[in-house]
Amino acid sequence: MLAKSHTGLVNVDLLRPYTVDGSCRDLAHCRHGPDAGAATPYHGKESLANGDMEAGMELFVEYGDEWFADREWKFGVLPLSDDFLDADELIQDFYETHKTAFQTIHDDHDIMTNLQDRWDGILMNQKDEDEGLVMALPTDVRDMDEVRQTGSARHSVPNVVRSLEWLDEHGICLDNIEPKMSSSVVGQRGAFATRSLREGQVIAPAPLVHMQRHFLHLYQEERDKSDPQLVSDQLLLNYCYGHANSSLVFFPYAPIVNYINHSPTVPNAKIRWSQHSSYEHANWTHTDHKSVDDIMKHDAAALLMEFVATRDIGKGEEILIDYGPKWQDAWNTHVQQWTTPSDAETFFPAAYWNENESLILTSKEQIEHPYPSNVVLLCFLQRKIQEMYRVDNSTTIGPQYIWEPHDDDHEVMDGMGNAKKCEILKRSVRRNDGDDDERSYYGVRVFGKEDRSWIVAGLPREFVEFYDKPYTSNQHLRHAFRHEIHLPDDLFPSNWMDLTPSSSSTPNPNPNKDTDEKPPGSLETCGLFLAESSIPNAGFGLYTGKDISSGDDISYPDLAIQVEHNSGVSSAGLLDPYFWDANKMDVSNEAKNVRSLVPGIGMLANSHPGVDNAWFQDLKVDSAGLHRSKDTGTGGFTNQHDVRHQANIFIPAGMELFPNNDDSWFLSRNETIGNIPLRRDYSAADELLDHFWSLVEGDVTSDFAKDLWELAWVDIGIRSDRVKKALPTDLDGVVDVMQNHFDSTAVYSIPKSTRSLDWLNENGLCVDNIKPGPSTISQAGPGAFATRSIPRGHTITSSPIIPIHRQQIVHTSQGTESLLLNYCYGFPNSPVLLFPYGPVVNFINHNSVEPNAYIRWSNFTTHTQEWLEMSVDEKIHQDTVKPLLEFVATRDIRAGEEVMIDYGSRWEESWDKHVEKWNPPPGTEEYVSASE
């Protein structure tokens, strides 16, 4: 965590931990003591130099090019690993081409100028093709020879090597301690002095990551959703420092410091805020009188503590501090209440089998002598075998390979990327030439992706390991000890103490659990559901969860966004079918070629040409109290945020909503939805059935009725294909329509248009957990507020999204960016924008300090992964796969509380720049909008 990364200067390889379940004092009795699960089972994670390093050089680990590319919004464009390699090659080529000129470059100004002009031309040409490469290249040809010798990566960080004198003055020594088996805690590891330390000397620094303790809470997943139960905390809490009266905890991430153990009686060290000069000049410190909210605004670690010797400490002596009386009390209580788990006698971790099982049983042998269910076998494979498998298209049993020794076999065990789940098919034991001992070898079946597998023969025992299955190791024991290390009052700033001494540091998961009184405005049952439409192949639809009388509002109002159609762009892609006509919305004066988007019912509810039960009410215009002469938020959100739909007939609970659209709407979409019956066709079909029913006198079983229906069926097919599609296909369907099983042929065409509430609760998603209202955030306009209490971890609402290309909608004819951009989600490295159109979701505002919700992909649909793997072109053109976004509560949310998410630091930086540069437009003092 402490070492930085540089894409061109990685000099340290991080290996996987060599010890798992190193927290057990006895692998055969791993769950017998109260310390079971209280310490991490992973130890011995080594870091190796991957080449020669000179003293004073900074250490760089590999984050991977993707890590930097994904954060371009934060760091800007940076050279990646290939950019530095390409830069070195380009520099060498340029130098060799002009080698003679370079020999006199510092003596002849004309030669230097000529070389510089040529080099500038290369930089200009490359800038358009690869900005990262250009950033890796030197700009001054006088530096060319030095860069050629040191490499472009090394040149990019001139201070990568510091003198030892500079480090002694400006740095803090990190290797005063090393890990060994503890002398104070049986079976655990501790930190030991590597050299003699004087009283008052800094043993080790402790840079801290700050977080709020509720981030570490673990809840019972299988519990009733309305009553979540806090069951434990993450193991990380045991390594954090904090105070009982604060929601803050701090994790130290310097080398070895997390091995420092507790001694209440004979500690030889203490922790304090750092007195190092570099800490005094940090961006912020513990002395800045910041509140908890202020601290949580910082997205980078800055706080620094240090461990200090309280007496002289000899080389090889264990370092011990006092964790505090509250920690000691918690441990004593835990020991008193500890009961050995019921599976303690039969539980053996993977480390036990790796240490004791020299010969691994084959799959057939395991039928009679199975390994425990908590372990799985992993085979570590040479990369050449993995590469052969990737290019082999065999399926079922798959290809077969033979393990052959290779010079880099020692590296195979270093990374989990080489590990594959496997089963043992065959075992052989033999003595190789020159070996005194016998070795076991295995034929294994290795399992890959998509049910593929392949056979590897001759795999040595050391490349097969037992591994603990997820959630089976001791750290997942329900009653394992959990408590932060306590910081004394004199160290902990009072402005961080946001919990009263009598309050619990664990919040009540359900604040309404102990009272029958509902919060004001809390709704009992869901009034609006998102579920599969009753119209075949129409995707999602909206259903009412309550009876709605004619003339009543169907649900909460939503907003409207006016989008100008840019004549330079042929199409808005998948948005095109969702636009409303500007004249119908009465907004044609907003701009030239303007069209309207109305999320919620206006985009999500499907229309049926023969059935409509909802109609659009004229929208209202409201600036939310902001004025362009003084408010920086003016124009940042639509001023049309009271769009309502009303029932035009009585709508029973469970019925799908069908907003009114005239036949012209369906005719304009004939190419996409086909030659479907229109309103007039369903009316004609109803008249035909009435006439037929009177002729046969309600008896469809007679030969006359059958012959008449056959003739009518043929005749209508000749005259109108649309009317024919509106009719039932057989006489049983005629009976269903005429005997009032269905009101009309239109309703008959969608037999599942009314669902039971049980079906909707099981197969649908509630989407009326939020409603619009004036936001509590300044300049934000309207916001979204909870209509009922929502427990932590529960979905607040869900929304399908429409992927669109930035070029399709971003720019208007005036050269500005479309307001629609403010309602889209996106990523700076992608041209794809995602517009959510679920009810009320576009009212959800930004709060980076105390967000109470976050977004994630929903598992409600089964094809989200398929969509994520599509190319950009496929995403913005296909309309058959639609993923859902979920807004999820990060803590308990009360009814009436505003729901807010973190839009991200890039958005916040843009807003801050907007506020800083904002000036009221000329003449705005006298401006009065038409709505005012």
Image (spheres, rainbow, N blue to C red):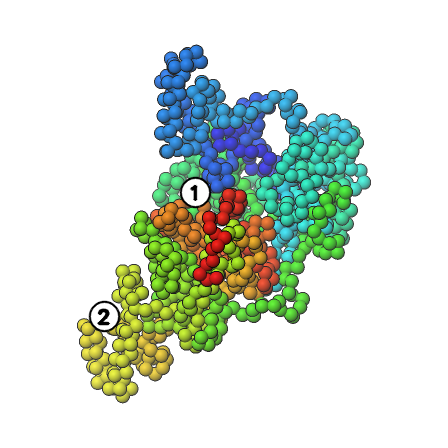
Reading the image, the residue beneath label 2 is 721
Foreground of the two, 331 or 515: 515
Q: Residue 421 in the image: x percent, y percent?
A: 49, 45
Q: Residue 519 in the image: x percent, y percent?
A: 62, 67
State the separation of the CA atoms marked 1 and 2: 49 Å
Report the residue that reaches farthest toward the bottom: 697
Foreground of the two, 647 or 755: 647
Find residue 56 and report its image quarter: top right
Q: Residue 355 in the image: x percent, y percent?
A: 60, 40
**Residue type highlighted by circle 1:** Asn
Q: Residue at x 52, y 63 (%)?
A: 771
Report the residue that reaches farthest toward the right: 265
Q: Residue at x 46, y 70 (%)?
A: 554
Q: Is residue 178 above or below residue 918?
A: above
Please tell me which of labels 1 and 2 falls first in the chain.
2
Crowd tier of the residue under label 1, counting other residues whose Cα lies within 10 Å: few below 14, some 14–19, many 20 or above: few
Foreground of the two, 150 or 73: 73
Q: Is residue 50 above or below residue 98?
A: below
Q: Quadrant of the N terminus?
A: top right
- In the image, taking residue 543 as reference, residue 662 lies left or right, namely left
Find residue 742 and report its image quarter: bottom left
Find residue 15 and report its image quarter: top right
Reading the image, the residue beneath label 1 is 829
Looking at the image, is mark 1 or mark 2 nearer the viewer? 1
Task: Let me know if residue 381 appears in the view.
Answer: no
Query: Residue 558 — which label?
Result: none
**Residue type highlighted by circle 2:** Asp
- Give SS at disc 2: helix
